Amino acid sequence: MTTHDLTVAEFSEPLRRPAMVNQEDARPGLALTNRSLAIEGVPTIPISGEIHYSRVPRARWRERLELMAAGGITVVATYVIWLHHVPTRGEPDFTGNLDLGAFVDLCAEVGLDVVLRIGPWCHGEARNGGFPDWVQQADVEHRTDDPAYLALAAEWYAQIGSAVADRCGPSGPILGIQLDNELYDQPGHLATLKRLARDAGLHAPIWTATAWGGAQLPLPEVMPLFGGYGDGFWVDSDAGWDPTFRSHYSFTDIWDDPGIGADVRTAPPGSAAVTEPGTWVPPATCELGGGMATTYHRRNLPTALDVAAVAHTKIGNGSAWQGYYMYAGGTNPRPNLQESHATGYPNDLPGLSYDFHAPIGEAGLLAPSHAELRRQHAFLAAFGDLLATWPSTTTPRWAYRGDGDHGVLFIAWHQPHYDPLPPSEPLRFRLRRPSGSVTLPSAAVSIPPGTLARWPVGLQVGGVRIDWATASLLTVLDAPDGVPTLVLSAHPGLAPEIAVDGVAHPLEPGLAPARLTQAGAELDVLVLDAEQSEQAWVRETPERTLYLSPATLRWSATGPVRVTGGASTAVERYDTARRAFIGVPLEQHGAEPREGEVGLELVRDAVGPVPTGYGQFRNRESAPTPDRVESHAAIWRLALPDWAAGDRTYLRIDWAGDLGELRVNGRAVSDRFWDGSSWWVNLADSGVVDGAEITLHLLPLSSRSTIHLPPQAQARRDDRDLLALDALTLVRFGEWTLA
C-alpha cells in the first residue's frame, strides 16, 4: 500500500485586474482578473463550445444551440469565415445560414453569450485558412501591417460590423472577440487588427488571441487563450502518438502546447509562453479537443473518455475558462471549401464533412462525449464560484484545487493508445494543508483504469462540512424544506464513502439519499451509479433540476425541455421534496419513432486495381480526386420507404473502405474518410424528398496504403484490399416536450 502526499501551500497571489477590461469596452458587472472572470461580483468559470453557423443549416441553429445549453455550455464561440461570406469581392453575403446577426440574436435568446473569432485568417480547416481566393491571390504581405493588406482586413471587419455592431454594446451578447488565429510573431499586427475592428464598430469587454506555440502577443491588449488535444492530424501518418498529445492526460502547470497547428506554422515556435497564466491573466482555453477532424492521411478517433480526460485535467490544473473546439460539427456550405493539398496546405480533408467527432455531430446527434462532458459542466456550474478562486497543486495523476482548508481532489487515471494504464497499486492520498493533514479513503484502494474523479475535501454544503468523499461531485439541489441534496457520481470498481466528523460511512449508489446531520445542520447525499451518471442532465434555469434519461434533452433559458429518442423514451426528475426520482409525463409532437431497413441495388462494383496511394504532398498521403471517385467507386442505389422523407430521419451507414460519398440526385450531400465509426446522415438536411435518387459511392482501401487508422479500424485490414458495406439502417426519432 502506498500513500501519496500532496503539500498544499497558503495562496497569497495578489489579485490583479488586467487592463483589457477597460473603460472603452467595459461591461457593467463584469470583471476579469488574473484569477477568473467575475459576473456581478461572483467568480465564474465560463464554458465555451465552438460551432460554425455557416456550417449548420439555419433551420437547425436553435436545436444545436439548445443541445449546447443542455450540455452545460454557457458561451458560443464561432469563426466568422471570410471565404464563406465573400467569395467574390464586393458581394458580401450575410443572408440565410450566413446571417451572423440572426445567429447572435438566437444565441442570446437561448441564453448563451458569444465569442466571435473574426480572423481575417481563421484556419478552421477552411481553404486558404478562410481567406477568399481573391485575398489569397492579392499582392500583399498577408497577416502583417502592410497597408495594402490592412485595407483588405478593414474592408472585411467593416462588413462584420455592419452585421453585428449593434449587438456589441454593454448589454449585448458578444462577450469576446478573437483576433486572427495562430499568429505567432506579429504582436504589433494583432494590436492593429484590434484598432481596425473597433473602428468598424466591433466591441467586446474581452479581446483574445491564441497563445500556443510560444506566441508573441500584445499584452495587455488581448487575453491569451490556450488549447489541448489528445491526438491530432497535424503530424504524419507514421508519427505515432506525439508527446504534445500525451501531455494532456496528466496534470501540469504548463499551459502552452507547441504542437497545435505546427504543420502550418511559418514562424519558429517561441521559446516560452507569452506570460505565466495566473500572474497577469487567468489560465484559459479556447481549443480543448471536443473531438478531432478526420484527414486523409491520419484518421484519429478519440473516445468519449479521451475527450473528457483532457478537459478534466485542465480543470484540475486551475482552468478559469473551459473552451472546446469543436463542440458541434457541421458541413461546409459548398464543395471545395476545405483545406487540401491542392490549395497548398499539408492536409486533405473531406470536401463537405466537418463532423470532427464532436459531442454534437454533423447530423445533429450526440456522441458519448456529450454525457462525459456535461457531468463536468454541471460540476462547474454548481461549484465554479469556489473553484475560480482556488489555486492548484499538481502531480501527473492527481491534483488538488483548493485553499488551505477545503477543495477538490482530482484523479486522472486514463491514457489511451500505446500505454494504457493498468489498475493502480493499492493507495491512499494524504493532503498536507495549513489547516492540518487529511488522509483518504479509509482503506487503500486500487484506482481502476478510466477513472476521472472529483472528490470533495473539507467542502461545506448546507452547513455540513464533508471531510472527504470518494464519489465525484456533480451538483447541489435546493429543497422546499431547506435541506439541500448533494449529488455525487460513483465510479465503477470503487465503493463510495463519505467522511464527516472524522468518521467514514459507506454510500449506496442508485438508492435513496443518505441524510447527514452536523451541529443542527442537515444534508442529503444522493449517489448516482454508473448508468444513472451517464443519463444525468442538469438544467440550471429557471431553477436547478436533475433529470435522468437515455434520450436526448435540450432546452433554452426559458423554454420547455424538449426530448428526442426512440419508442421507449422516458424521463425521470429528482423530486427533492419526495427524495426520489419520479417519472415525468411526455407530450409527443410529430411522427412516431421508427426503424427500418434500406433497399439496395448494386449499380457498379469498384473498378480495380486499387493503387497503393494517390500521391503525396509534404510526405503526407493525398486523397483520391473527384474524378477517381466518379470512375472507380462502387455504387449502390438506395430504396427508401415513404416515411424516410420526414423530419428527424437518419441514415446510418456501417462500412469499411477508404472514401465514401452519399449523393442525392447526383449531388454529393455527405462524405467521409473511413475511420471505423458509423456514418450518420440527416436525410431532411440532405435534401431527401419523395422520389429522389439516392446513391452511395465507396472506394476500397488498398492493402498497401500507409494511412494512419484507429486500432479498431486497422484490425479489419489484411493482405486484401478492403471494401465492405456492413449495414444500412434507417432511424426516425420521436420528439416530445415535458408536460
Image (cartoon, helix red, strand yellow):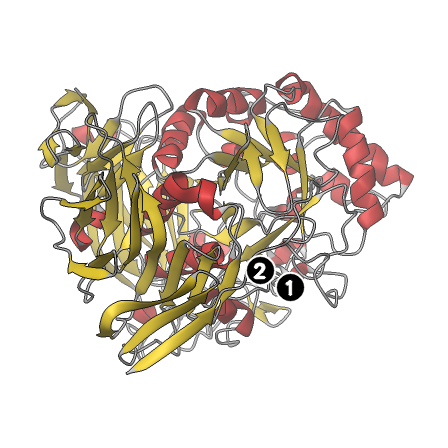
Query: Quick check: marks 1 and 2 in contact, CB under 8 Å?
Result: yes
Q: Position of residue 483 (x, y in %)?
A: 22, 34
Q: From what the image shows, is residue 107 above or below residue 402?
A: above
Farthest top residue in view = 166
Residue 617 picture quarter:
bottom right
User: Is 520 or 157 nearer to us in this picture?
Assistant: 520
Residue type marked 2:
Asn
Residue 317 located left or right of residue 118? left
Residue 91 visible somewhere in the drawing: no
Residue 692 visible somewhere in the drawing: yes
* Alpha-carbon span between mark 1 and mark 2: 9 Å
Q: Categorize mark 1 by other alpha carbons within 10 Å: few (<14), some (14-19), many (20+).
A: some
Query: Where does label 1 land, which residue?
Result: 263
In what quadrant of the picture does the C terminus appear?
top left
User: Is 338 or 292 nearer to us in this picture?
Assistant: 292
User: Is label 1 in a helix, a strand or a loop?
Assistant: helix
Q: Categorize mark 2 by other alpha carbons within 10 Å: few (<14), some (14-19), many (20+).
A: many
Q: Position of residue 482 (x, y in %)?
A: 23, 29
Can you tell which mark lies on residue 347?
Answer: 2
Q: From what the image shows, is residue 556 above or below residue 598?
A: above
Residue 202 picture quarter:
top right
Residue type marked 1:
Asp
User: Is label 2 in a helix, a strand or a loop?
Assistant: loop
